[in-house]
Image (cartoon, grey):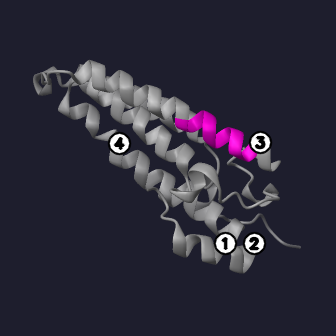
Amino acid sequence: MVGPTRYPTRMLLELKLPPPVLVVIAGALMYGAAEWLPMLAYTLPGAHGAARAIAVVAVLIIGVAVLGFLHAGTTIDPRHPKKANTLVTSGLYRFSRNPMYLADLLLLVAWALKLGNWAAWLPVPLFVWWMNRFQIRVEEAALAARFKDDYAAYCRKVRRWL
């Protein structure tokens, strides 16, 4: 009789939190940090306008990237990369292997600018680390197994983020 399988913590975290949920969590942490450390507030002329522009660009990138997946007829659910039936390499995917995640990062940058507090920037690199470690790395392994040489060639041509 085999006992319960013991998974390392890292495996328990892989692909568990959808990126939009992570963006909300990071955004809440950013807000909390800004509120908790008001002495780290700063004023940057034009920050609010820049934040709006960056957010608009991010939303457009997400929309175009999702449309690319839908047009290719492949899954947009990042929790199940093994369900990908097409390797999308056109459109925005010619410049970034992860334009949706890049757009998520841009949303967090816009939020940090809007908050105007140095402490609000702290969760941003944590978001990038989490995405690389618990989302992208696992996705890439699944895509490499599924699309083999085509995916390897794509990775040689296109960077992970930008």
Identify residue for label 4: 124
Mark 2 to mark 3: distance in Å?
18 Å
Q: Residues within 10 Å of mark 3 (few under 14, many from 20)?
A: few
Q: Residue furthest bottom?
A: 149
Image quadrant of residue 8? bottom right
Identify residue for label 1: 151
Query: Which sits in the foreground, 109 or 121?
Result: 109
Image quadrant of residue 105? top left
- Disc 4 residue type? Val
Mark 1 to mark 2: distance in Å?
5 Å
Mark 1 to mark 3: distance in Å?
19 Å
Query: Which sits in the foreground, 124 or 39?
Result: 124
Query: Which sits in the foreground, 58 or 111?
Result: 58
Residue 147, disc: 2
Question: Would residue 150 appear left or right of 130 to someone viewing this image?
Answer: right
Image quadrant of residue 46? top left
Mark 4 to mark 1: distance in Å?
28 Å
Q: Work out whether mark 4 precedes mark 1 in sequence or the reverse, and give the earlier one.
A: 4
- How far from the left and from the top, in percent, is residue 75? 78, 47
Q: Residue furthest front?
A: 91
